[in-house]
Image: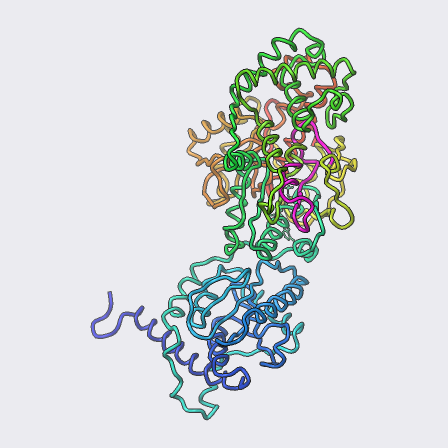
């Protein structure tokens, strides 16, 4: 309640702020008179920008004003919203020329701040036009009328803390000596001797600026990685590549972060659409959320999708009928196995039909093989069971029986959808549908999937970017990019080496698990499981808990989750190798009153609940705390998977399965930044 006779405190404060704002404006108008060459319009715009310096922004104005009007920015403005490279344009100036000069100035500013690790996503070219206009975009340039400039700049997402604003502005001042720092000085008008009144206020949008402090205060800064990277990473983000490129590197080395920044950078340099795909469904959703925060201006032009759902939409748009039916396809395979597999030579090698389904899915259909002659000699990468010519014939017979069952039922499986999309994408067309395609976790795609993406952009400069890590491949089969006809040479193949995610202990435990599993990376080079990774030092722990019984183990798990500090669930995941495990722990946590968010519903926005899902669904994600209950159940004594009774698999297929399970577990373990909780039952433990 306000006191009788006095204005409420809020209103008083508002009046005080308004008075200060008017004083700033008066002072700024007088100070701007010194830029005589800028003309009346330019002075007014500069005064508006000067006012921002009273709110923690730093302004650098060209000394050559208007000078040669050569490439370069009139104004560099640094504030919580980032770096703005500004062209001050009077109404009658040729806009095309100004735009070209502004973009050249922006590039120079991007190069300058890249040395500090600042991503180009945080550098925005702006054209401020004399007179009032609605905001528009001109390519990557934000075009603002002079009255909108202040409010729009203040309303940008908060990316830089005051110390960063200072450091960046100081750096720019050093790098651009032809610019001088200027700030509003409330005492200036008194000292200047100029009349205190007589400055036209009509054009100054007090309302817009008055509302902004509230909005500013409400917006917590976005995450650091959305603005700052390592300078080497920024180099990759900005690089011009003459054709398809690849970024690989061990887990947690910032591959996805670089891919997202590069996507934003490319989107700002074109007017076309971009496609960002991965294999898994939920990862693109999470990445879309992050992208919207870090690069809102271009988010509308980037499609984030799983490859399969993208392919289905693409075919639908092109009028190609798709009859995807997983259940019917499973039935088709079951019948084919019954007819030609179960009693044949394949069952003696591995009686699990799943093994042979994978052979068809990944080695035959995944690679787009359509003739036995191709299959007879194809290298079956990551498959440990070697097959003789006769055995390959038996596989081919199974494949043909499956194909005929699918035809009979008139259904497609997932591989058929990609093959149809590839045929459609390979048709000649006037314009490529995308300016660029970025594939994350590319090691999980099939060869047909990668060919499909390549077909969308071909070998265009900066067209295709493949990002991934062969060590995190969790599916059988495998291929080399050269098999897809993608020629990545010279500096278009890049490897990141510094892990920024995991604490040393966590990474060590994960690498110990796969130490003996050498793998072929995307470049086709065989790499030892315990590979060299540079660590950024931060603390973190691996906690191992063994329960004498399953119940005791689960009790420990609930206890550990409950003892996390308040709010920590938002950055916590509980991951299981199978859907069965997920259901079990979902029931357990719900019974125990621990909030749960299924990973398939998680979209990257903070939610105060444990994210629960399979190892595969967690691909590409990360959490501060990761809980892996009964983590060693499947892998302790060699693999028993795919419903195969113990002892009936060939030793090679058991080895292969064990390796895939270790890869899945490796991925799950490396999702943890600070705490990795490993639970086992009955003293079983994997050396790690
Ligand atoms: N230069 C950097 N400085 C600080 N942190 C960084 C830097 N680069 C990346 N990170 C952080 O490292 C973590 C891992 O990044 P990212 O998810 O991009 O790695 P990745 O290589 O794609 O991992 P994975 O292959 O395991 O999915 C993220 O938290 C990211 O913010």
Q: Is residue 221 left or right of residue 343?
A: left
Q: Is residue 669 or residue 67 the one in the foreground? A: 67
State the image coordinates of residue 686 (x, y, percent, origin top left).
Answer: 68, 27
- Please name whichever residue, 169 or 369, is drawn nearer the observer in this view of the structure: 369
Look at the image and tell me whether residue 300 can be seen: yes
Residue found at the very far bottom of the displayed protein: 193
Is 675 within the magenta? Answer: no
Q: Residue 462 colored magenta?
A: yes
Which residue is at 77% across, 37% downward? 524
* Front-lying residue, 615 or 1: 615
Q: Using the rendered view, name the quadrant where residue 684 is placed.
A: top right
- Residue 408, percent across and down? 55, 15
Display colour scheme: rainbow
Image spot of residue 142 (x, y percent): 51, 64
**Residue 628 point in image, percent of width and height:** 58, 32
Q: Please state, as top left, top right, bottom left or bottom right, where the C terminus lies in the image.
A: top right
Q: How many marks?
A: 0
Q: Which residue is depicted at the point 45% across and 87% down?
A: 189
Measured along the vertical axis of the image, is residue 178 above or below residue 525? below
Residue 440 shows up from this direction: no
Which residue is farthest left? 4
In this view, the residue farthest toward the top is 343
| In the displayed structure image, the side of residue 91 where residue 467 appears, left or right | right
Q: Could you tell me which quadrant the N terminus lies in?
A: bottom left
Q: Which residues are magenta?
A: 451-480
Q: Quadrant of residue 401?
A: top right
Depicted 312 relative to depicted 21: above or below: above
The one of 449 and 669 positioned closer to us in this rendering? 449
At 65% across and 31% down in the image, what residue appears? 474
Compared to residue 87, the image places residue 267 above or below, namely above
């Amino acid at each position: 309640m306000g006191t009788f006779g006095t204005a409420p405190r809020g209103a008083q404060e508002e009046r005080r702020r308004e008075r200060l704002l008017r004083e700033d404006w008066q002072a700024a108008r007088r100070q701007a008179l010194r830029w005589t060459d800028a003309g009346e319009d330019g002075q007014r715009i500069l005064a508006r920008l000067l006012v921002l310096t009273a709110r923690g922004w730093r302004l650098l104005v060209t000394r050559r004003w208007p000078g040669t009007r050569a490439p370069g920015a009139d104004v560099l403005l640094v504030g919580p919203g980032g770096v703005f490279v500004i062209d001050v344009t009077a109404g009658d100036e040729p806009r095309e020329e100004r735009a070209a000069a502004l973009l050249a100035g922006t590039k120079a500013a991007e190069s300058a701040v890249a040395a500090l690790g600042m991503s180009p996503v945080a550098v925005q070219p702006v054209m401020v036009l004399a007179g009032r206009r609605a905001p528009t975009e001109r390519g990557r340039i934000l075009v603002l009328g002079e009255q909108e400039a202040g409010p729009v700049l203040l309303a940008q997402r908060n990316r830089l803390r005051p110390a960063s604003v200072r450091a960046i502005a100081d750096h720019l001042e050093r790098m651009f000596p032809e610019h001088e720092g200027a700030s509003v000085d409330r005492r200036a008008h008194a000292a200047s001797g100029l009349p205190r009144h007589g400055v036209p206020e009509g054009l100054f949008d007090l309302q817009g600026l008055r509302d902004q402090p509230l909005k500013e205060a409400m917006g917590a800064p976005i995450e650091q990685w959305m603005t700052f990277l390592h300078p080497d990473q920024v180099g990759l983000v900005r690089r011009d590549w003459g054709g398809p490129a690849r970024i690989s590197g061990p887990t947690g080395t910032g591959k996805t972060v670089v891919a997202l920044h590069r996507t934003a950078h490319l989107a700002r340099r074109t007017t076309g659409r971009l496609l960002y795909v991965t294999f898994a469904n939920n990862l693109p959703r999470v990445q879309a959320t992050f992208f919207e925060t870090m690069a809102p201006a271009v988010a509308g032009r980037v499609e984030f999708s799983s490859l399969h759902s993208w392919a289905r939409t693409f075919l639908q748009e092109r009028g190609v009928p798709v009859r995807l039916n997983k259940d019917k396809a499973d039935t088709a395979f079951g019948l084919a196995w019954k007819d030609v597999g179960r009693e044949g030579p394949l069952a003696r090698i591995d009686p699990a039909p799943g093994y042979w389904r994978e052979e068809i899915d990944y080695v035959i259909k995944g690679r787009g093989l359509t003739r036995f002659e191709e299959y007879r000699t194809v290298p079956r990468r990551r498959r440990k069971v070697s097959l003789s010519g006769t055995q390959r014939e038996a596989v081919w017979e199974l494949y043909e029986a499956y194909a005929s069952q699918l035809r009979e039922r008139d259904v497609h499986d997932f591989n058929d959808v990609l093959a149809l999309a590839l045929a459609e994408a390979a048709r000649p067309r006037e314009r490529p549908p995308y300016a660029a395609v970025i594939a994350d976790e590319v090691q999980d795609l099939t060869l047909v999937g990668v060919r499909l993406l390549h077909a969308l952009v071909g070998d265009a400069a900066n067209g295709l970017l493949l990002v991934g890590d062969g060590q995190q491949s969790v599916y059988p089969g495998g291929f080399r990019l050269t098999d897809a006809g993608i020629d990545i040479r010279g500096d278009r193949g890049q490897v990141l080496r510094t892990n920024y995610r995991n604490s040393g202990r966590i990474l060590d435990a994960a690498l110990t698990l796969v130490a003996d599993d050498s793998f072929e990376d995307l470049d086709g080079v065989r790499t030892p499981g315990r590979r060299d990774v540079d660590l950024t030092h931060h603390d973190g722990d691996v906690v191992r808990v063994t329960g004498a019984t399953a119940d005791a183990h689960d009790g420990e798990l609930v206890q550990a989750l409950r003892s996390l500090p308040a709010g920590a669930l938002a950055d916590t995941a509980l991951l299981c190798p199978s859907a069965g495990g997920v259901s079990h722990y979902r029931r357990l946590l719900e019974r125990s009153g621990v909030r749960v968010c299924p990973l398939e519903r998680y979209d990257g926005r903070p939610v105060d609940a444990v994210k629960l899902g399979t190892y595969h669904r967690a691909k590409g994600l990360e959490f501060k705390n990761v809980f892996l209950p009964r983590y060693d159940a499947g892998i302790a004594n060699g693999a028993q998977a795919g419903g195969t009774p113990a002892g009936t698999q060939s030793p090679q297929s058991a080895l292969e399965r064990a390796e895939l399970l270790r890869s899945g577990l490796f991925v799950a373990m490396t999702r943890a930044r600070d705490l990795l909780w490993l639970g086992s039952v009955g003293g079983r433990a994997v050396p790690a």
